[in-house]
Image (cartoon, rainbow, N blue to C red):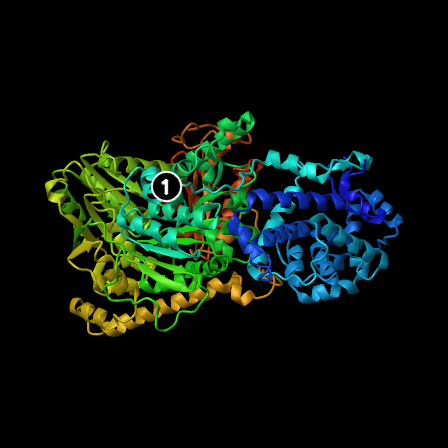
Amino acid sequence: MMAKDEMILSSPARSLWGKLSLDGTHRWLPLWMHLADTAEIADLLWAHWLPPHTKNVIVDGFDFSESVSTADREIFAGKFVRFLAASHDCGKASPAFVEKARKVGFSDIVDEITSKGLSVEVKNQAMAKRFSHALVGEAILEHQGVDRSLADIVGAHHGKPVGVKQDLKAAPEYSSLTGMKDEAWRSVQKELVQYALHLAGCSSITGVTLSMPAQVILSGLLIMADWLASDETRFPLISRDYGIMKIESSHDRARQAWSCLHLPEYKQFASACPWSQLYEERFGRQPRPVQVHALQVASRLEHPGLMVIEAPMGEGKTEAALAAAEAFARRFGLGGIYFALPTQATSDGIFPRIEKWIEHLHAGVSRSIFLAHGKSGFNDVYTGIRLKSHLYDEEDDDEKQADVVVNDWTQGRKKGLLADFVVGTIDHVLMGGLKMKHLALRHLGLVNKVIILDECHAYDAYMSQYLDLVLSWLGAYDVPVIVLSATLPPHRRQELLAAYQNRKIEKKVDIATDPVSPYPLISYTDGKNVYQDLPEPSGRKRVVRLAQLDEDNLGETLSALLSDGGCAGIIRNTVKKAQSVAQCMEMYFGEDCVRLIHSCFLSFDRVRKEQEIRDLLGPQEDHRPDRLIVVGTQVMEQSLDVDFDVLFTEICPMDLLLQRIGRLHRHNRKKARPSRLEEATCYIMGIQDALTFDEGSTAVYGEYLLMKTRAFLEQRLVLPDDIPRLVQQVYEAGYDDEIINRLAKEADIADVSQQYANARDRYEKCIKEKKNKATTFQIKTPKAQRRNLLGWLNASQTEDVSGKRGEATVRDSGNSLTVLVICKKEDGGLYTLPWLPGHGDERIDDVPDDALAKAIASCSINLPSYFVQDWQIDKVIDELEQIVLDNHLKDWYASHWLKGELFLVLNEEHEMHLLDRILVYDEKNGLWSYKEE
């Protein structure tokens, strides 16, 4: 019996090829069969994987009359998805594509096709590249009466929409390449479009149009379906002499492939737990007021929207966001969450909490999870889940299925966002606004979820440009977004709300920004409206004394304060100063009493050190030492849940200063603090006078924000009451006169006003430059893109294998260079570092096996800023590449852990010459350098 998918096709149409093997086995897949395979897998994705919310975005994109029922609308949309999948490669029915078979040893296929009356004479190979089969497919559909808003989805199925309208218009004129004016080819092309309609169960789609948001999401869904149907392990190619009657139907092939994929099917992740019991059931404790209000707001909204939760540090914003996400998911049919944080360290820190929350959602229902950052392979919790997931797959026992699994298909930088639950850096959200290939697939991953953006105050003007753009798309998709911050400036809140609603901020803002803003505060959209909810404060208050300190007196001051014991934190604004202070503190207190943490430690060293500090100074008091001094940099602002008895910090912008103070007397301790440290005190260093600050601090933050922060430093803070006022005074307009008057009282110079104005001008110029720079590779807003995908990704970011270029584009962090560190001994052998866990001081004679390669890859570190300046970074790379060649390290690139890496090869004293400096690494201080004499 002949396969049912092929019966309606003519002999010429049956002869066209869709896939060819490149392994010498001379296997192929007819085009009609690949189209049918893709239609079947798209149908399964629609029926079983896609959340109701995403289906609604697509359904709402069609212009239905009011008389069409909701059920009929979804049925039509499902048929249209099948049509797109069944027609996506119709452009392969063209001479230019068919000719490609000759180049890979399949001349017999080309000869058979020509024997069917289809001419294949491609003379201009250079011009053939202009007319890709995706472009030709879009042109064919348009010529068959399909609206461009639909046809462009086919044109974009390889990740980038057609860029130039003229190419579409020119396609018929180059008929020797496209076949669009050749009668025989046109007949086959029309036949394939009819075949697609047949597979979709449609008679015609002429006159059907689609909204821009729906086009993007369908483009992502088509890419996913095509990738799945192109997987030869699940959709095997067939021998050229394989009898056509023996071919398994695409329906059966797709279902067999689907059963092997183990993609968790959509099931509402929010259980029917009563809202009044949710916090107790999920987190094992009663909620605070801000948590109650967040859940109440999310559960009563008529429309998905943006919720901004502003509350003090330690108030439970994470739990509030997760509870609100459940409410959003239950009401609007979302399939998961993306929990986004500023850094890899903060992502790793929150990951176990998210996993535990997922396990409490629905016992026995598998949920896929993905950790979205470049070092996820070193996260023990994540890799443990992945290992267990493979064991469950092998057992294939429904009763033993895990609640949280790592699905192999939803891995990697492009497919990872398709997992149900994603924890990762903010970069992967911001890249939703970046012109790069397969962007629609990223949008598909985001539109399936509730998006949670933590520490939103941490994103600078450059990143905020991308965030606002992505919010405009998420708003167009009606994706619920929850923003969390303890120190968000009012104007930034307004910008976020306006971006989500795709509107401009009017001169008179929607929400009054009174000098004393309410706090905690929940601001949210519901349709076109903006509202605020004012939770009662939890009642937890801290009075913090502020005192300026000359850093020359740091040692003596600490000695006096810690005479009866206590744990102190010292935060410096640069790694170099943190290293220097740590060495000084060791002279006062001994090495055992001092810990150092900053960004210039090897990855595995930093993870170990951060965990040790959490264990010693975290919420549990079991291991809290009698005396300890932790010296660090900005890494202590966000990633460490620790409690200091006293804090010393260099001056920094007010919001960051408040974040640092959040580590002071953070936890309610059972054991009394030392008598000298019962009063929470923060000593502020680095202020030379009212207008002059430490050179390193100025280089990091600029003078303007430091001046404004200096102006509003007081002797006493009441937290959280003073947080909104202080943030507003530093970041909002209208306080200049007060700032100048305050600074003038402290400064011993006459031109305070002019110096302040100069600093403000430099700051505003910098912000403007950042915003302008950010637009270089940005897509348009949904309003600006308007009708279709044509040109959507023109002038896109260059594709790279690692994805690091895209991540770098959405951050304005300057140059950075990551290297791996190994040793070379006098015997000429290469060795791992002596203290590397499990592989210490191990000689490496051959290409490392997988376990050793992973251990070496954990020895990654960023070079100090001196080595990555614009004027010499190329020289540094040249020297490091020469090191790779001299030590035959290119052989190591066979390991996926080490591919493309650069190396520092230290001597037995753990030193190395680079440029005009000596680089030194030690386990205690990290990486540092000194000038060669």
> Percent position (x, y) of residue 601?
37, 41
Pick the residue in front: 805 or 593: 805
- In the rendered image, the quadrant that contains the N terminus is top right
Q: Quadrant of residue 641?
A: top left
Q: Name the residue under label 1.
A: 349
The picture places residue 853, in percent across and down from the top left corner, at 50, 33
Q: Can residue 686 be seen in this view?
A: yes
Q: Is the residue 65 above or below the residue 233 in the image?
A: below
Residue 235 showing in the rendered view: no
Q: Which residue is found at the position 41% from the left and 41% from the top?
A: 272
Q: Few, some or many C-alpha atoms within 10 Å of disc 1 (few <14, some 14-19, many ≥20)? A: some
Residue that extends furthest to the left in the rendered view of this protein: 675
Quadrant in the rendering for residue 623: top left
In the image: residue 836, left or right of residue 590:
right
User: Disc 1 marks which amino acid?
Assistant: Gly
Rendered image quadrant of residue 596: top left
Can you give x and y, in whole percent of width and height, for residue 454 in the image?
A: 37, 50
Residue shown at 46% from the left, 34% from the top: 403
Q: How many marks?
A: 1
Could you tell me which residue is drawn at 30 percent across and 48 percent down?
292
Q: Answer with left or right where residue 98 lies relative to residue 292.
A: right
> Going by the picture, which residue comes out furthest to the front?
67
Residue 930 lies, with reference to residue 621, above or below; the image says: below
Relative to residue 745, is residue 907 depicted above or below? above
Q: What element carries label 1?
A: helix
> Which of 185 and 23 lies nearest the eye of the viewer?
185
Q: Does residue 144 appear left or right of residue 491 in this picture?
A: right
Residue 702: x %, y % from top left: 32, 62
Pick the residue in front: 4 or 262: 4
